[in-house]
Image: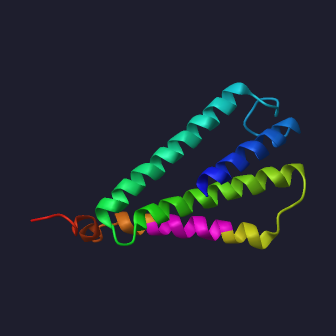
Amino acid sequence: WPIILMALDIVTGLIKAAYGASDKSIKGYIDSTVMWQGGIKKLLTLVVICVSTILSYLITPDTMAVRIVTISYYVAEEALSVLENISVCGPKPPGFLLRILEKLQTNAENIKNNMSAPGNQEIIHKNEEP
């Protein structure tokens, strides 16, 4: 899902720039530097997902919790970006859909913060051998 949403974000971002409504370039139109930076950001997001998959396998192999939370966060972020791009150029997305995605992103962020909080370190070390 993250890759599909990233592709949709790129396409809708290009459409938004074709409308002259991009908030990432000086004149609002397509800018190769902005596209390059966005592509690097997408690539690094995939790297983060790969790292979270490895960590999840090492830390929580039964549930893959770290991977699920990471992917949920990025799915929500990409989906929100797609809907924001669409709303600038055409139909307004339903408010409930935006609220669902914002809640998903917030929940993933809260879980991430709780996993790194002091006192939760036993989760990280539970699979280490003595």
Confirm whether the magenta stretch covers residue 108.
yes
Q: Position of residue 27 (x, y in %)?
A: 82, 29
Residue in the picture at 82% in, 37% down: 17
Q: Position of residue 94 (x, y in %)?
A: 82, 69
Confirm whether the magenta stretch covers residue 4.
no
Q: Is residue 17 above or below residue 115?
A: above
Coloring scheme used: rainbow
Residue 22 visible in rendering: no
> Which region is colored magenta?
101-111
Residue in the picture at 18% in, 64% down: 128
- Is residue 3 left or right of 90 when viewed as pictured? left
- Location of residue 61 (image quadrant): bottom left
- Is residue 53 left or right of 120 when viewed as pictured? right
- Location of residue 63 (image quadrant): bottom left
Q: Position of residue 16 (x, y in %)?
A: 82, 42
Q: Is residue 34 above or below residue 117?
A: above
Residue in the picture at 34% in, 57% down: 55
For the N terminus, give its image quadrant: bottom right
Residue 28 visible in rendering: yes
Q: Find the residue positioned furthest to the left.
A: 130
Q: Nearer the viewer, residue 67 or 107?
A: 67
Q: Is residue 71 above or below residue 27?
A: below
Residue in the picture at 61% in, 50% down: 3
Q: Main secondary structure of the magenta part?
A: helix
For the C terminus, give its image quadrant: bottom left
Q: Position of residue 87 (x, y in %)?
A: 84, 55
